[in-house]
Structures are given as structure tokens and as C-alpha cells.
Amino acid sequence: MYIAENPIFHERTKHLRIDCHYTKDKILEGFLQIAYVPSKEQLANLMTKPLGELQHNLLSSRLGLVGSPPIPACGGGGGC
């Protein structure tokens, strides 16, 4: 966020890809807004990180996902 809002860092960030500079320009134009999202509220974590049950359920509910019944450990064949 700091790099995107502070044009002084341009010299230090020349290695960043063009899409990052494009995004920074759009932020400076006011076309995009950025906001800090705490890790516990980051929806992408649902698909990218192992989460505990409570965190998984919280993020799933925020996406509107409906829970399904648990799958039995033996595969449901009845021969457990």
C-alpha cells in the first residue's frame, strides 16, 4: 500500500512488473482505492492456506458457501 501511494519509491521499485506500475497509476488517478485487509478477513486465504475449522467456516460464510455433510473417513462404503 505504501509503495502504491508514495511516488518517491519509484526509483526503488523499477524491478516491479509493468502491471504494478499501471495499478499504482490508477490509484494515484483515484480510479482504484486500496484498503488494508487483516489476514483473518482475507477471503483468498480460504483457497490458498490451510485454515482451522472456525476460520474456514467464517470465510466460507462470507462467500455465501453452504456447508455440506462431512464425508466419512472410510469413503462411505459401509465396510469401515
Image (spheres, rainbow, N blue to C red):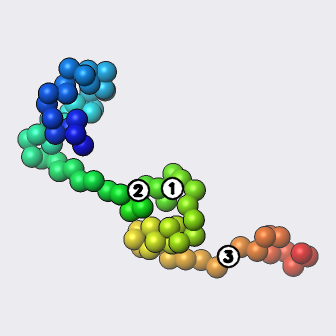
Compared to 43, does 27 lie above or below?
A: above
Q: CA distance from mark 3 to mark 1?
A: 19 Å
Mark 3, residue position = 70
Outermost residue on the left side: it is 29
Name which residue lies at 25% across and 22% down.
12
Name which residue lies at 58% across and 56% down.
50
Quarter assignment of residue 40: bottom left
Q: Report the amino acid beneath label 2.
A: Ser
Question: Which of the two residues, 77 or 30, is positioned nearer the viewer here?
Answer: 30
Determine whether, in the image, residue 51 is placed left or right of residue 3: right
Which numbered disc covers residue 39? 2
Q: Residues within 10 Å of mark 3 (few under 14, many from 20)?
A: few
> How many numbered discs?
3
Compared to 66, does 30 lie above or below?
A: above
* Label 2 or label 3, whichever comes before in sequence order: 2
Measuring from the top left, give residue 61's x and y in whole percent.
44, 74
Q: Report the amino acid beneath label 3.
A: Pro
Name which residue lies at 31% across and 21% down.
15
Q: Report the amino acid beneath label 1.
A: Met
Q: Quadrant of the N terminus?
A: top left
Measuring from the top left, give residue 38's x and y in whole percent.
35, 57
Q: Is residue 60 visible?
A: no
Measuring from the top left, give residue 69's x and y in whole percent.
64, 79
Measuring from the top left, give residue 29's x and y in whole percent.
8, 41
Asked which secondary structure carries label 1, the reply is helix
Q: CA distance from mark 2 to mark 3?
A: 27 Å
Mark 1, residue position = 47
Which numbered disc covers residue 66? none
Looking at the image, do the residues carrying marks 2 and 3 touch, with CB atoms under 8 Å apart?
no
Question: Which of the two residues, 72 or 10, is positioned nearer the viewer here?
Answer: 10
Compared to 5, does 36 lie above or below?
A: below
